[in-house]
Image (cartoon, helix red, strand yellow):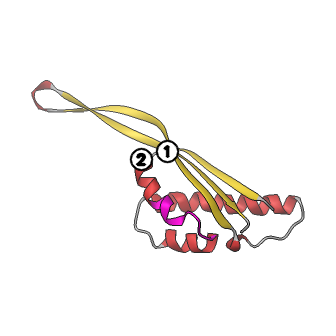
Amino acid sequence: MAEAIARARFIRMAPRKLRLVADLIRGKTVEEARDTLAFTIKGAAPVLAKVLNSAVANAESKAAETRQRIDADEMIIKKVIVNEGPTMKRLHFQPRGRAARIRKRMSHIELVIGDS
């Protein structure tokens, strides 16, 4: 089994915040990454845990199609990419008739797991 990919697109969280947590799990095994995400106190941790679980499910599904046995906890996170998605622009009204722009950023996540 080579590798499995999971993607999450249009996540309503800034890429900068997601990259902080993505850097913690890059290169670790799936088991270590799950433990790290479970005890990380950041809003991005549950989002990345969901993508990681999706990648593991994709790997198991791919292995079942070819009738192979895999140990998902021993797989390694090869690549975690957090790209910037579209930005929603909103107005925040200021004193004296002015307005400031608020940028609500979105992210696209791609996670690849594979054999060691």
| Number of residues whose C-alpha sits closer than 10 Å to that of mark 2, classed few (under 14), some (14–19) or many (20 or more) | many
Question: In this picture, which residue range is highlighted in magenta?
Answer: 21-29
Classify residue 71 as left or right of residue 24.
right
Q: Is residue 99 above or below residue 44?
A: above
The amino acid sitting under disc 2 is Ala
- Residue 30: x and y in percent read 63, 69
Residue 34 belongs to the span the image colors magenta: no
| Element marked by disc 2 | loop
Residue extending farthest right: 67
The amino acid sitting under disc 1 is Ser
Label 2 with label 1: CB-CB less than 8 Å: yes
Mark earlier in primary sequence (2, 1): 2
Q: Which mark is residue 14?
A: 2
Image quadrant holding the C terminus, namely bottom right
Q: Which mark is residue 107?
A: 1
Residue drawn at 49 percent across, 44 percent down? 107
